[in-house]
Image (cartoon, grey):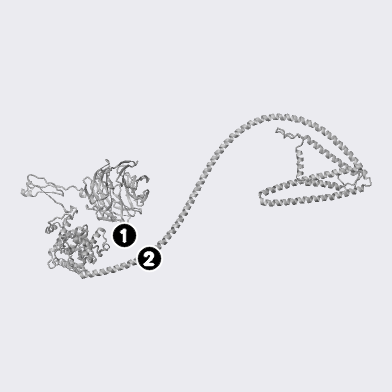
């Protein structure tokens, strides 16, 4: 059996030489994942799955490493590292390079084996995925866990459907039926339903078994044609269902040692048309038995009690079986090798030859009849009987073809040692089937169960507590049996607790009798008491006396070899003792060792020493070529090319040819079996040395215990210190983690804030976009409404245009009527104007006459005044009058200046009042703001209005003053002229009266003056008589100016007044020229 280790390797060969699986185990190669050491455990394979062709398979381990094993190319590759334990595999997808892996995190991943990349990641399960079933097309898959099953589409890797059940029921397995679209679901309550994969409608349900037997189904298998279902569980019964008739048609009952079925697999065959006839059943004992369901016979089995099978997968072509073992390794079995004995053709029947019928034969008929034999190769056939002769049949069964089962069950009696020796010399070994029984008979084992139980009840001997450190045996069961056997030997005799080579001596017997510890112990004890005589006399040194016997025999038969040993310093402790202390187990194979000890147990105990010498003599040629001590040591500790038959033959020759004086038989006693009931006392050793070693060992043990106790205390103190340090470090680490977590949370908060800010920005952007869209919609709505309004306005304008046009037509008609009325009224006004012009002409003529009369009266008046003036000039009182006039003029000037000063004071007071009001206005402006500015503006406007009114009033006062002075002068002149006497005029009274009237006008120049002016203006605007040019009361839109005659009259009046003024000036000038007055200041009369 070849072994391949894939640990720390990503690619390599599966086997390094051509595999030759045997029919006994059928193992092609054993694939491991790391070696076993006391401190480390190998990585365990968990799942295995073949592809559609059956020439490649996947293996997944507990660390998530997925290996691809290509059996055609003899290569393995690490295709993926998932870092999680895989719970299920599937390698039959429609894309041949892809495979599915169910992981421990309840997810299912799809990988590509070529580019080693992840294709898809499928989530949805909440518990471990226990199985993956792929549809025949490879496009759909069903994943099953304890609580749900999910159907996936492998093209899109999307979940199509999900099967949920109550937690109390649970799902056992859900899988596709081959060559159909049916999904079979098996639940933990033994109910089985069939569903259509396309519509997921229930097609049928398998009924309960009619016999009422209840098997808690756990394992299921379907034939390749999908017609038969095998179901098994916590029972030794297997139910076979016909899925066509939906009935249970057969129940297979496994052996009584099977009480639970873990897995079922049909073994495909190329010529069965898909209806597989061989069913593989993996039971709780780790053995997978393949049974023919038609004949109910065992075809073959794989696995053993020591190395059981956990799970298996059968290739679709039926050529290979890949199994995950208990120790975590992977075994690849050859189905062809396992079925070699079954599939070989039947042996031919050899027909007996009748020599009496041969004409050339001279043999007597009686002798010929007694020699007729029909030989059948392994099968008993009934011979044909004739009337003349009797045919006898003899069956020859080769021993190698028989099984090793029931070795200790049947014990035949009547064995004879001599006959056994004759059989041994004839065949060279005992039959394999009966070897153990023959050995037990030769050794005459007493089978003292009570004594052996008392020895095993003492427990493990202290000397062999750490046996696994010195001898790391792979099989725990073998190590446990070896430890118990050695402990029993040590409890039987103290010397065996001190013997260092005892495990090497006992190991081959322990491995051979590991299933029966009593027989193992008694065989080892018998070998020690008989074939190890005088071995312990020089304890703890090797048995020098025994080695001397071997050396004497060697010196007698081959002095050259012994001389060669002596020349290179090779003693018997190098060339003889390694063979004796291991009983040849290091230098011989299992078959060779068994053949040797067939002869050892059948002869005198000295035969073992002769076998040592024979081994040396048969290997003399390579030994004579050795010159280094290391080469000799290597030679006697490793297997060599040796013919075991020749060695045994040489041993018998030495037994016969050795002289009696040096023959070991002379010093070794005959074989003595163990006593029945109680085992004999074994004290053939230096007791004081053993006791001393025991005491020393006990003392060392106590010291070691004390040292261990102190070391334990030290370790506890150190552990306490380490614990405190670890707590401190953990606390600091926790603080760092907390700080890191806080920083991380802050970072998360910052990231969250950034994300929120980003989201807010996006939200603001979206809002802005929505607002813009809304505004656009509103704009569109507004435009639409505006278009609607425009349309309405257009309609309204059109309607208005129509209305205006209608009104214009109406107005034109009315205007035409009005124009006619206006023309009529104009004609009336023209007639009225002519009438008024006639009246005005009459009035002008009348006024002209009046003015002419007045001018004549004025002229006469002026002449009269001139005459009177010249008369007065001629009187004596002219100087006195002039003086009075001058005084009156001076007094008038003084009064005028005083009046002017009063006017200035009054004007200054008004300015002060105005400044004070301006100051108040500014203060109010600062507090009231814009209102004060408006008020200031109003005040300024009022001031401007007041000034305007003041100027107007001043002008009006000045005009009245001038008119008053003129009227006074005219009155004085008239009075002077009428009285003819110069009277003293009280100018002060006149001025006071004038001043009084002036002040009254000034004090009332505000509102009263404005009222008077306004009244005058109103009087001018609204005369009592209606003017001809006032067309406000007229209904016509056309105005006419009818006051051209009035303007002419006024112009004529002004011209007349100017002529009168010029006439007066001419008269005054003529008077001055005629009567010059140089003594008086020139006076202008107006």
Q: Position of residue 657 (x, y in %)?
A: 12, 64
Depth check: 995 or 854 in front?
Answer: 995
Q: Tell me the quarter of the picture where residue 804 sits.
A: top right
Category of crowding for the residue at label 2, using alpha-carbon neighbours closer than 10 angstroms: few (below 14), some (14–19), many (at least 20):
few
The CA distance from mark 1 to mark 2 is 27 Å
Mark identifier at residue 416 = none
Identify the secondary structure beneath mark 1.
loop
Depth check: 478 or 680 in front?
Answer: 680
Depth check: 369 or 635 in front?
Answer: 369
Instruction: Tell me which numbered mark, 1 or 2, is placed earlier along the sequence.
Output: 1
Is mark 1 in CB contact (under 8 Å) with mark 2? no
Q: Position of residue 966 (x, y in %)?
A: 84, 44
- The relative height of residue 331 versus residue 178 in the rendered view (above or below) is below
Q: Position of residue 872 (x, y in %)?
A: 92, 44
Category of crowding for the residue at label 1, using alpha-carbon neighbours closer than 10 angstroms: few (below 14), some (14–19), many (at least 20):
few
- The relative height of residue 337 versus residue 1018 in the rendered view (above or below) is below
Q: Which residue is mark 1?
A: 40
- The relative height of residue 284 versus residue 1069 in the rendered view (above or below) is below
Q: Position of residue 988 (x, y in %)?
A: 86, 48
Q: Which residue is mark 2?
A: 721
Q: Is residue 787 left or right of residue 18?
A: right
Q: Tell me the quarter of the picture where residue 834 sits.
A: top right
Residue at 60% in and 34% down:
797
Q: Quadrant of the C terminus?
A: top right
Q: Is residue 999 left or right of residue 873?
A: left
Identify the secondary structure beneath mark 2.
helix
């Amino acid at each position: 059996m070849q072994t391949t280790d894939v640990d720390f390797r990503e690619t390599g060969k599966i086997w390094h030489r051509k595999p030759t699986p045997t029919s006994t185990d059928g193992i092609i190669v054993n694939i491991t994942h790391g070696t076993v050491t006391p401190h480390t455990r190998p990585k365990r394979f968990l799942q295995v799955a073949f592809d559609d062709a059956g020439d490649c398979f996947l293996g997944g381990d507990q660390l998530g490493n997925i290996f691809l094993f290509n059996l055609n190319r003899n290569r393995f590759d690490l295709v993926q590292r998932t870092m999680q334990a895989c719970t299920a595999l599937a390698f039959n997808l429609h894309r041949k390079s892809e495979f599915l892996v169910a992981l421990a995190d309840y997810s299912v991943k799809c990988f590509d084996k070529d580019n080693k990349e992840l294709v898809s990641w499928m989530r949805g399960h909440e518990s471990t995925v226990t199985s993956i079933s792929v549809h025949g097309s490879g496009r759909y898959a069903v994943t099953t866990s304890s609580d749900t099953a999910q159907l996936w589409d492998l093209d899109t890797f999307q979940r199509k459907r999900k099967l949920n059940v109550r937690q109390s029921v649970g799902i056992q397995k859900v899988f596709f039926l081959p060559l159909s679209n049916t999904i079979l679901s098996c639940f933990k309550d033994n109910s089985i339903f069939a569903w259509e994969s396309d519509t997921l409608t229930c097609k049928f349900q398998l009924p309960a078994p009619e016999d009422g037997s209840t098997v808690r189904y756990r394992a299921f298998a379907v034939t390749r044609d999908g017609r038969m279902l095998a179901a098994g569980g916590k029972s030794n019964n297997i139910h076979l269902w016909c899925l066509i008739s939906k009935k249970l048609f057969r129940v297979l009952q496994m052996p009584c040692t099977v009480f639970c079925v873990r897995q079922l697999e049909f073994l495909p065959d190329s010529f069965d048309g898909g209806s597989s006839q061989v069913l593989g059943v993996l039971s709780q004992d780790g053995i997978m038995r393949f049974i023919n369901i038609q004949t109910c016979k065992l075809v073959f089995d794989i696995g053993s009690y020591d190395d059981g099978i956990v799970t298996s997968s059968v290739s679709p072509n039926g050529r290979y079986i890949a199994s995950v073992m208990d120790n975590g390794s992977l075994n690849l079995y050859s189905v062809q090798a396992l079925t070699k004995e079954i599939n070989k053709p039947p042996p031919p029947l050899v027909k007996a030859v009748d020599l009496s019928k041969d004409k050339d034969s001279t043999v007597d008929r009686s002798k010929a009849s007694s020699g007729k034999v029909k030989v059948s190769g392994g099968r008993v056939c009934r011979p044909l009987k004739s009337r003349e002769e009797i045919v006898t049949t003899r069956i020859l069964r080769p021993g190698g073809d028989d099984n090793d089962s029931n070795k200790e069950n049947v014990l035949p009696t009547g064995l004879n040692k001599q006959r056994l020796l004759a059989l041994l010399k004839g065949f060279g070994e005992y039959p394999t089937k009966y070897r153990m029984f023959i050995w037990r008979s030769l050794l005459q084992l007493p089978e003292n169960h009570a004594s052996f139980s008392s020895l095993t009840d003492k427990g493990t001997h202290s000397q062999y507590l750490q046996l696994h450190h010195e001898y790391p045996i792979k099989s725990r069961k073998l190590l446990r049996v070896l430890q118990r056997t050695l402990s029993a030997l040590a409890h039987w005799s103290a010397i065996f607790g001190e013997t260092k080579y005892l495990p090497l001596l006992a190991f081959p017997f322990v491995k051979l009798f590991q299933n029966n510890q009593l027989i193992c112990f008694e065989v080892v004890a018998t070998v020690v008491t008989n074939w190890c005589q005088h071995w312990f006399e020089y304890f703890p040194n090797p048995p020098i006396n025994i080695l001397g016997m071997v050396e004497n025999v060697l010196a007698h038969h081959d002095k050259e070899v012994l001389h060669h040993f002596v020349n290179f310093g090779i003693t018997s402790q190098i060339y003889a003792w390694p063979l004796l202390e291991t009983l040849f187990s290091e230098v011989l194979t299992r078959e060779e060792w068994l053949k040797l000890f067939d002869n050892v147990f059948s002869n005198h105990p000295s035969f073992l020493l002769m076998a040592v010498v024979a081994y040396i003599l048969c290997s003399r040629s390579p030994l004579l070529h050795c010159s280094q001590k290391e080469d000799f040591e290597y030679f006697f500790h490793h297997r060599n090319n040796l013919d075991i038959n020749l060695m045994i033959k040489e041993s018998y020759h030495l037994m016969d040819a050795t002289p009696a004086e040096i023959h070991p038989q002379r010093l070794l006693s005959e074989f003595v079996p163990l006593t029945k009931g109680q085992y004999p006392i074994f004290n053939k050793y230096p007791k004081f040395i053993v006791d001393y070693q025991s005491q020393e060992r006990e003392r060392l043990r106590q010291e070691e215990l004390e040292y261990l106790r102190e070391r334990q205390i030290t370790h506890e103190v150190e552990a306490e210190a380490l614990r405190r340090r670890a707590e401190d470090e953990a606390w600091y680490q926790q603080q760092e983690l907390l700080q890191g977590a806080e920083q991380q949370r802050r970072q998360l908060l910052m990231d969250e804030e950034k994300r929120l800010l980003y989201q807010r920005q996006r939200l603001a952007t979206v809002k802005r976009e929505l607002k813009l869209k809304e505004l656009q919609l509103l704009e569109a709505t507004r435009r639409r409404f505006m278009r609607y309004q425009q349309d309405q306005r257009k309609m309204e304008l059109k309607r208005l245009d129509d209305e205006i046009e209608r009104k214009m037509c109406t107005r034109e008609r009315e205007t035409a009527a009005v124009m006619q009325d206006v023309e009529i009224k104009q004609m009336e006004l023209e007639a009225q104007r002519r009438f008024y012009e006639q009246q005005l002409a009459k009035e002008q003529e009348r006024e002209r006459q009046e003015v002419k009369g007045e001018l004549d009266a004025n002229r006469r008046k002026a002449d009269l005044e001139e005459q009177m003036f010249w008369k007065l000039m001629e009187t004596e009182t002219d100087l006195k009058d002039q003086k009075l006039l001058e005084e009156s003029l001076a007094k008038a000037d003084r009064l005028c200046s005083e009046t002017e000063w009063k006017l200035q004071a009054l004007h200054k007071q008004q300015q002060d009042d105005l400044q004070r009001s301006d100051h108040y206005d500014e203060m109010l402006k600062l507090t009231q703001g814009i209102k004060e500015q408006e008020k200031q503006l109003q005040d300024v406007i009022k001031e401007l209005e007041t000034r305007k009114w003041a100027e107007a009033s001043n002008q009006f006062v000045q005009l009245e003053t001038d008119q008053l002075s003129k009227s006074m002068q005219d009155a004085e002149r008239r009075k002077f002229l009428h009285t003819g006497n110069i009277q003293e005029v009280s100018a002060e009274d006149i001025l006071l009266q004038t001043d009084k009237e002036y002040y009254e006008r000034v004090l009332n120049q505000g509102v009263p003056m404005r009222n008077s002016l306004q009244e005058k203006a109103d009087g001018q605007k609204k005369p009592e008589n209606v003017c001809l040019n006032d067309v406000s009361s007229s209904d016509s839109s056309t105005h006419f100016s009818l006051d051209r005659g009035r303007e002419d009259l006024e112009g004529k009046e002004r011209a007349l007044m100017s002529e009168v003024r010029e006439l007066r000036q001419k008269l005054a000038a003529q008077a001055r020229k005629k009567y010059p007055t140089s003594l008086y200041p020139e006076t202008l009369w107006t």
